[in-house]
Amino acid sequence: MLEKTNNVFEKIIGYNGSLKEAIAKLKAAVLYPPFGLNVMLTGEPGVGKTMIAEAAHKYLTNSRGNDIPFVYFNCSEYYNNPELLTAHLFGHMKGAYTGAQTDRIGLIEKANGGFLFLDEVHRLTSEGQEKLFTVIDRGIFSRVGESQSHSVNVRFICATTEDIQSTMLKTFLRRIQVVVHLPSLFERPIEERLELALLFLQQESNKVSKPIDVSNAFLKYMLERNYTGNIGQLKSNIQFICAQAYLDSLTDKTDTIRIDNRFMKVDDNMEKTPVEGFNAFTEAENILLIPDQYSITAEKLLRKPVPEQKKDIFYSFLLNEFIKLRNSNVSYQETLSILRKKIETIFDYGIYQKDDGNQVQTHNFKLYDKMEVVLSYIEEFIPYKLNEATKNNLRNHFYSLLSVVEENKKDDFFLYSGQLIINKLDYYEEAKKICEKIEEEFQIKCPPTELSFISMLLRDLLRGENKSQLRKDCGVVIIAHGQSTASSMGEYANHLFSQQIIQAINIPIEQSVNDTLEFLKKLVRKNKYQKLILMVDIGSLLYFGNIISEEFKIEVLMIKNINLLSVLELMREIIYESTDFNYLLSVMNDKNHQTVLCRKGGYRDKRVLIITCITGIGTALKIEKLLNDTFGEYFPNDLRLMTLDYEETKSLERLTPNLDKNERPLAIIGTFQTEIPDVPFIPLDVLFSEKGIERLMIVFGYDMANQKNEKIREAISSRYIQNLSLEAVVNYVNVLNPQKLLIEMMQVYRQICRQLDIHPGKLVMLRFMIHCCCLVERLAVNVDSIKPIRDYPLQENENVFDVIKLSFRNIELSYNIKLPPIEIQYIYELIYD
């Protein structure tokens, strides 16, 4: 009930506009129990700080139903006399100082139970601000010359035109809980500025009991000025001009005060900015304000601007392409071929875009009527009435059509447009009749492209009741890399076609391919899909189709390397044409969207483990032999080892020609990281580490929680140890001198063991040598440190770390490298097994 009855702030111009936030803060501050909060009002001179403070006081008074003190004090009055300031604020006892002949209460005591309004508070000296701390913090004060304290309950409202951070003590500002900034007059919207000007004019009319006749030109002149004194200066200027006009009315013996161009100073130097949209005033030249009648408002005087006409993409796209064609080296026929393939998608985008619910605005009622005639004529060819959204989109299209014809009369666009008629025109005769009707009503010559537009319109309208129904057991899923890439494309397509068809799976940078595949499997399982249309972008996602088809025994139509256009074209086909996979396979490939059909139970992808080396194929072949000898019969049946030169693994485009049609890369083993997304990379030093065999088994698909697989790991590891030797180290170092590096690394190993007094076994020594030789080579050719399989916590034993760092000092100097801390940590783990 409080807000309904206490409408003090509603009388302030801008209470629900530019001052809405400020008033909300003030209401909260004064009503906060038990006694409210202290407030700082900031803003330029004349913005209404005193008025808003008085309104806050009245608001609280009305809320409580009893009188509450409101005491005003301008801090500039005693800013250069701290003693008088103190006496004025706190009061004084008789004899407290020369001239204090009686006891006197101060402003703080007068404001007890209410507000003390400190205007120009920035004029308080630091000492003056500090004197208020006890009152604000503890609610007590003493009069000058008095030893005892008095309790007081005062809330401060402070006002300043200055920057509070530079003029006020930080300790003072901490005690002011609420800061409210009031905008300047010129920061406020034109409606509020006009409302203020009308209010001041009305007040002058009431004062002199005479009507005031004001010209629109004068109002515009007043509102264009940037008043440094803000509302106060605007009011003063209006009062002075009214006084001049009043004198003229006495001289002319007229009953009306006239304010017009005579009072506009053309040569004044005041800063001004043209008021946008001021031509929206009524056609009336003047406004008449009658005493005591508040009937003229800004809302009545200002018309809302007509919304900008929504563009029709069909012709805007064609015209843009036409201009590009004229100014580029692309052949005429090639551009036409591309546009013909895209024209249907452009049509769908324009005609089925979401309508914002607003009627298309037009002040040319004859033109609007002609549009209605054409729309009614179109309805004669379909068995139902057009909905308002389609009508609005068609009205926009007609506007664009008229603009195209008007702006391109003497251009060769019509010749260009004639070549853009799509190959198959449905309902040709009907479309031709509608085009003739358009020409008759609008008195224009339609470009040939309009025939294509009307033909596609009739096709979709006549199929509107019988759209191709997507089976509920057929899923449509987009998967793409990025935080919201897939969901953005899916939401856009669903919104555009007013259908909730596409589901999206995003792949943020921290999400693994396996997790993404699991999300997809859960989606298929949850919805019990019997068919799936899968749209993916890059990387291992390209192999999801066969995985899902094999596991769930369903057909998967997969569109690769998708973008928004391919998504929209697929949506148009499945909604308006057919959901048959053989049809979609053909039509999407015809439109140059790479599409494959993974048939139910057709085949399973063969996995390929790729081994590469930066110096050539030799080392890769040695690693292949090592893995064959080590894993033997434990290799999965669907796995093939393939050795490639490093250059062939730099990108998926280079890698793909080396794979058979039904093969997909499982992982890459090598010295240096490749740039192929979603394909796991296993560096040589990890392969030769303690976790190397387990890492490979996980990649192959072994469940390491299974006890049986743990026994297999032990058997493979035993062979692995037998196949490793110092000779292997020489074979795997290619860029640096392996013999020299081997000798140097053995010295490092012995120095670490000696200083730490440890005696590791041969296997630890082999792993140390292989890992560190590969590490030095990797760092020597400026390849970043490989991210470890798991995150290692920093160790507290700094002595061990120092020993490892110092032992590698000569290596760092010799090869101009620096071991990262994580590599030192890794060596620590390796040595202590």
Image: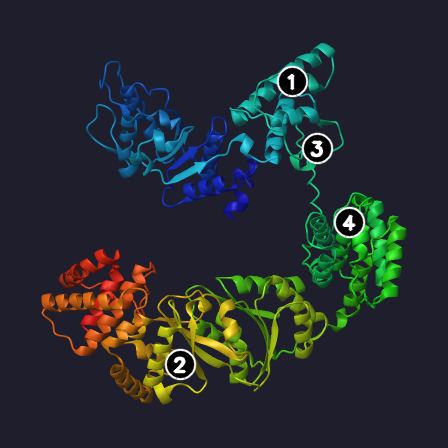
Q: Quadrant of residue 216?
A: top right
Looking at the rendered structure, the kind of residue marked 1 is: Val
Q: Secondary structure at mark 4?
A: helix
Q: Which residue is mark 4?
A: 399
**Mark 2 or mark 3, which is nearer to you?**
2
* Residue, far top: 251
Q: Which residue is mark 3?
A: 279
Q: Secondary structure at mark 2?
A: helix
The x and y percentages for residue 454 are 81, 60
Q: Compared with residue 60, is residue 747 higher up or lower down, i.e. above or below?
A: below
The x and y percentages for residue 643 are 42, 76
Q: Residues within 10 Å of mark 2 (few under 14, many from 20)?
A: some
Q: Which is more N-terminal, label 3 or label 2?
A: 3
Q: Which residue is mark 1?
A: 266
Color scheme of the displayed model? rainbow
Q: CA distance from mark 4 to mark 3?
A: 24 Å
Q: Are marks 4 and 3 in contact (CB under 8 Å)?
A: no
Q: Which residue is mark 2?
A: 700
